[in-house]
Image (cartoon, helix red, strand yellow):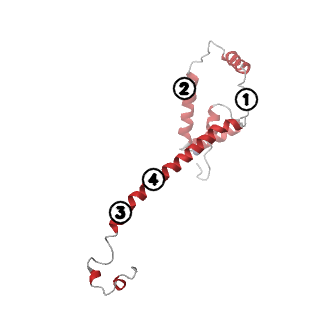
């Protein structure tokens, strides 16, 4: 085989096996396959498959399927289509009243609960502030050493 020569496509070999090629093309393929180590086994495999398929018994179904399919298609076409859904109607004002009431109720409940939280934190913050006042920058007893209170604690008046 000439190394520059390309192998034919497997479809061409399959067509040869199926006897679908003209005489000239078949002769050309035969010349190639005779000297090609790649195409020869492929052609042999195709011939073997072709023989195996030809050996299969021909089966004919007892039932003709075409009229059955036609009947089903006709039945499907005869069934009424599902009616198109009506367009969504706009909400009337009286239908929005419960929604508005619910919104107002939930908002006011949230505000009430929030105010209860704030009141609770203020009530607990007062004693804590008094306790924290014990930790001043001036150590205990230091005021006795100060000539005036303002010298030790300029913030105090
Ligand atoms: Zn080849």
Q: CA distance from mark 4 to mark 2?
A: 88 Å
Q: Between disc 4 and disc 2, whose residue precedes?
A: 2
Circle 2: is it few (<14), some (14-19), or many (20+) Cα within 10 Å? few
Q: CA distance from mark 4 to mark 1?
A: 53 Å
Q: Quadrant of ligand 1?
A: top right
Q: Position of residue 3 (x, y in %)?
A: 58, 52
Q: Nearer the viewer, residue 61 or 144?
A: 144
Q: Between disc 1 and disc 2, whose residue precedes?
A: 2
User: CB of residue at label 2: within 8 Å of ligand 1?
Assistant: no
Give yes or no for contact between labels 1 and 2 (Cβ–Cβ under 8 Å).
no
> Is residue 30 among what the camera can see?
no
Against 131, is 68 above or below?
above
From the image, state whether disc 1 or disc 2 is nearer to you: 1
Q: Position of residue 120 (x, y in %)?
A: 42, 54
Q: CA distance from mark 4 to mark 3?
A: 17 Å
In the drawing, does residue 77 fall left or right of residue 136?
Answer: right
Residue hosting label 3: 128
Against 134, is 127 above or below?
above
Q: Nearer the viewer, residue 88 or 2?
A: 88
Give yes or no for contact between labels 4 and 3 (Cβ–Cβ under 8 Å).
no
Q: CA distance from mark 2 to mark 3?
A: 98 Å
Residue at image location 34% in from the left, 70% down from the top: 133
Describe the element under mark 1 as helix, strand or loop: loop
From the image, state whether disc 1 or disc 3 is nearer to you: 3
Residue hosting label 4: 117
Q: CA distance from mark 1 to mark 3?
A: 69 Å
Describe the element under mark 4 as helix, strand or loop: helix
Residue hosting label 2: 52
Q: Position of residue 26 (x, y in %)?
A: 66, 37
Give yes or no for contact between labels 4 and 1 (Cβ–Cβ under 8 Å).
no
């Amino acid at each position: 085989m000439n190394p520059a020569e390309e192998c034919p496509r497997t479809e061409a070999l399959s067509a040869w096996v199926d006897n679908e090629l003209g005489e000239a093309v078949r002769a050309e393929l035969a010349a190639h396959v005779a000297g090609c180590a790649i195409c020869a086994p492929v052609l042999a495999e195709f011939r073997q498959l072709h023989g195996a398929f030809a050996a299969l018994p021909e089966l004919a179904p007892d039932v003709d399927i075409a009229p059955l399919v036609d009947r089903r298609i006709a039945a499907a076409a005869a069934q009424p289509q599902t009616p198109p859904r009506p367009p969504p109607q706009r909400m009337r004002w009286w239908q929005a009243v419960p929604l508005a009431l619910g919104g107002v109720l939930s908002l006011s409940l949230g505000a009430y609960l929030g105010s209860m939280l704030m009141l609770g934190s203020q009530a607990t913050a007062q004693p804590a502030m008094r306790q924290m006042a014990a930790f001043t920058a001036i150590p205990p007893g230091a005021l006795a050493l100060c000539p005036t209170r303002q010298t030790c604690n300029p913030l105090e008046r």
